Amino acid sequence: MELLMMEQPISSALHDLLSLPDEMEKLLHAPTRRYVRDTKAMASTPADVMEYPTSYHFVLDMPGLKPGDIKVQVEEGNVLTVSGERKREERQKRDKEEAEVKYLRMERRVGKFLRRFNLPKNADVDAISAAYEDGVLTVTVQKVPPPEPKKPKTIEIKVA
């Protein structure tokens, strides 16, 4: 009888430890900081994607960046990734008045940017080029030419 009474409190305590409160459950399933940062970076980097007969074109507005600030890569075999970081302008402090400047409004986005595109199966990942002009990045991915249709093979019929 005593043994039964001791088991009850232990199992109850164990049950309390194993059942997480709702707040803790939400924290465990909350997105990571990296995921939130990458999602914001992707949302703030708009792109146009166009298909031509022989290629795909990815056009992204990136005003104020230098080509060295932009990285274009193919990851995991077929994922086109455009990434980089837009930094706040470095102003030289000429006098005391300029040293005390504070922003009243800051609408131009600074920070990391990222876009990922799953390339179609007919994309030639070995034939990708990127051009940057007037703040616009254009990435061109050539298509693999379709295979030529096989000609029918004529089989000679022999008389036995």
Image (cartoon, rainbow, N blue to C red):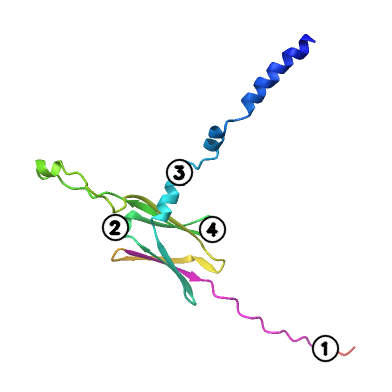
Name which of mark 3 and mark 2 comes first in the sequence.
3
Secondary structure category for the residue under label 2? loop
Q: Which mark is residue 66?
A: 2
Secondary structure category for the residue under label 1? loop
Q: On the picture, is 130 further left or further right than 26?
A: left
| CA–CA distance in space, label 3 to label 2 | 25 Å
Nearer the camera: disc 1 or disc 4: 4
Residue 49 drawn at (x, y percent): 45, 67
| CA–CA distance in space, label 1 to label 2 | 69 Å
Crowd rating for badge 4 (residues with CA inside 10 Å; few <14, some 14–19, many 20+): few
**Which residue in the structure is indicated by mark 3?**
34
- Image quarter in which the C terminus is found: bottom right
**Which residue in the structure is indicated by mark 1?**
157
Residue 25 drawn at (x, y percent): 56, 35
**Which residue in the structure is indicated by mark 4?**
77
Nearer the camera: disc 3 or disc 2: 3
Name which of mark 3 and mark 1 comes first in the sequence.
3
Nearer the camera: disc 3 or disc 1: 3
Q: Residue at x 31, y 52 (%)?
A: 109
In this rendering, the answer to whether 110 lies above or below 50 is above
Name which of mark 4 and mark 2 comes first in the sequence.
2
